[in-house]
Image (cartoon, helix red, strand yellow):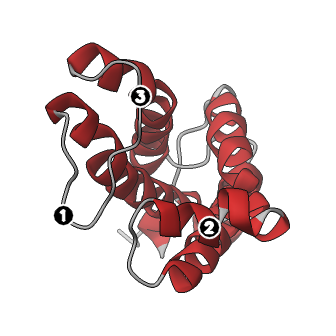
Amino acid sequence: MRQLLQTDVSKTTLLIRIMVGGIFSEGIQKFLYPMARGTGRFESMGFPYPEFFGNFIGFIELLAGMMVLMGVLTRVGAFSTITIMSVAIITTKIPIAFRESFGPFVLRDLEVYGFWSMAHELRTDFAMWLGSLFLIIKGGGRWSVDQKLYRAWYSFSWQPND
C-alpha cells in the first residue's frame, strides 16, 4: 500500500490529473447516451457482448476518472485508464494504419487510411495514454488524497537506539 500512495510533491501533477481524470470522467456518457456512446457504439465496432462491455467500460472509465481527479489511489486509476486506452488503440486505431479490420472489430469508414490517418485519430488516445503512464510513475502529486494518506500513515520519525 505504501508504494501505491507514495508520490512526488510536485504541484503541477494536478494538471495531468485534471487532464486524464476529466477526459475519463466522460465515461458517464456511456450511460446517458447508450446507443451513441455505450452499447450501440460497442455493437457497431464489433465487440462481443456489447451491452456488457459498454456498461463495464463506462463504469471503469467513470470510476478511474474520479480516482485520478481526486488523487485517490491514483496509480490504480491510471493503470485502469492506460489499460482501456491500450485496448482502444489496438482495436480501433492501429487497424486504420493497415486499412483492415482487426479480428471481430470493424474498421470504421474514413476518407483516408494509413499511418497519418491513424496518427490523426490517435492523438487524444495517445495523450491520455502518456498522461496515465506519467501518473503511474509519479503518483498523484502534492494536492492528492494519496499524499495526505501517505503523510498520515507513513511519515513518522524513528531513530534507532545507538
* Tag 2 residue: 40
User: Which residue is under mark 3?
Assistant: 110
Check disc 2 and report its element: helix, strand or loop: helix
Q: Is residue 5 above or below residue 107?
A: below
Which quadrant holds the C terminus? bottom left
Q: Is residue 129 visible?
A: yes
Which of 112 and 3 lies nearest the eye of the viewer?
112
Image location (x, y in percent) of residue 123: 45, 24
Tell which circle, 2 or 3, labels the residue nearer the N-terminal end. Answer: 2
| Label annotation for residue 140 | none
Q: Residue at x 50, y 38 (%)?
A: 128
Amino acid type, mark 3: Leu
Estimate the spatial distance between the alpha carbons at disc 2 and disc 3, rounded to whole Å. 19 Å
User: In front: 77, or 96?
Assistant: 96
The answer to whether mark 2 and mark 1 are in CB contact below 8 A is no
Q: Amino acid at mark 1?
A: Gly
Do tag 1 and tag 3 residues touch (Cβ < 8 Å)? no
| SS of the residue under disc 1 | loop
Residue behind mark 1:
103
Whether residue 145 is visible to the viewer of this picture, yes or no, is no
Residue 58 location, x and y as percent? Answer: 65, 68
Is disc 1 surrounded by few (<14), some (14 to 19) or many (20+) residues within 10 Å?
few
* Badge 2: residue crowd in 10 Å (few <14, some 14–19, many ≥20): some
Horizontal side of residue 11 vs 60, given as left or right: right
Q: Give the vertical position of 27 relative to 120 (above or below).
A: below
Q: Earlier in the sequence, mark 1 or mark 3?
A: 1
**Element class at badge 3:** loop
Q: CA distance from mark 1 to mark 3?
A: 19 Å
